[in-house]
Image (cartoon, grey):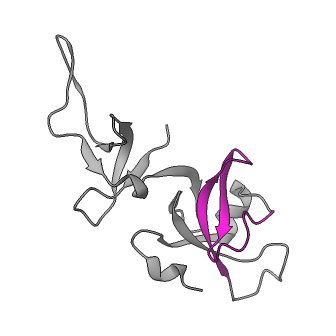
Amino acid sequence: MRQYRAIPIGGKEFVYGSLVNIKNHRFFIVPVETTLTPLNSGFEYPDIFIEVISETVGQQTGLPDKNGVEIYEGDICSIIKVGIVDMDDPNPYRRIIKWNNRKGGFDHFRIDGKEGGSGWSFLQSTVEKYYEVIGDIHQHPELLEA
């Protein structure tokens, strides 16, 4: 199962694990290393739920970038313009990784918001060669500037 990440309320760094939505649009991350202990009437959750800022929740895409770094929803990637310019072009451009409802999968979108997805696929063979995670929209907002 793909994991999630989010920034805890009052925190600055991402926590990683399973996502839990309890009620009233409150989201929690159960860290990856957590083991749940069965009791007589269910499970005990001693301080293992970390409440997070809902706007920072992002799911792992299941794909690594060219350096082997896992890519998450909300990451900002530097991408060489495959099929548009020569692959030796040293001037990559930046895209935000988001869920694309129309395609039913993750895709990259322009930072300036002038257009939607790129029109070329967010496929493993492309991502592993030409994408590099350079930050994310929550901790590196300066990367959103054109």
Number of numbered callouts drawn: 0
- Magenta residues, start to end: 92-119
Residue 4 as seen in the image, left or right of residue 144: left
- Outermost top residue: 40
Residue 109 as seen in the image, left or right of residue 132: right
* Residue at x-position 79% and y-position 73%: 82
* Residue at x-position 54% and y-position 84%: 145
Q: Nearer the viewer, residue 140 or 71?
A: 140
Is 110 colored magenta in this rendering? yes
Residue 133 versus residue 14 in the image, above or below:
below
- Outermost front residue: 24
Q: Nearer the viewer, residue 93 or 115?
A: 115
Q: Is residue 10 visible?
A: yes
For the C terminus, give its image quadrant.
bottom right
Residue 139 versus residue 16 in the image, above or below:
below
Where does residue 81 sit, x and y in percent of width and height? Answer: 76, 77
Where does residue 51 sit, x and y in percent of width and height? Answer: 26, 47
Where does residue 133 sit, x and y in percent of width and height? Answer: 53, 70
* Residue at x-position 33% and y-position 58%: 7
* Residue at x-position 42% and y-position 57%: 55
Residue 37 versus residue 70 in the image, above or below:
above
Residue 58 as seen in the image, left or right of residue 50: right
Q: Quadrant of residue 14?
A: bottom left
Q: Quadrant of residue 95?
A: bottom right
Q: Nearer the viewer, residue 19 or 129?
A: 19
Residue 98 as seen in the image, left or right of residue 10: right
Q: Is residue 31 visible?
A: no
Q: Nearer the viewer, residue 55 or 40?
A: 55
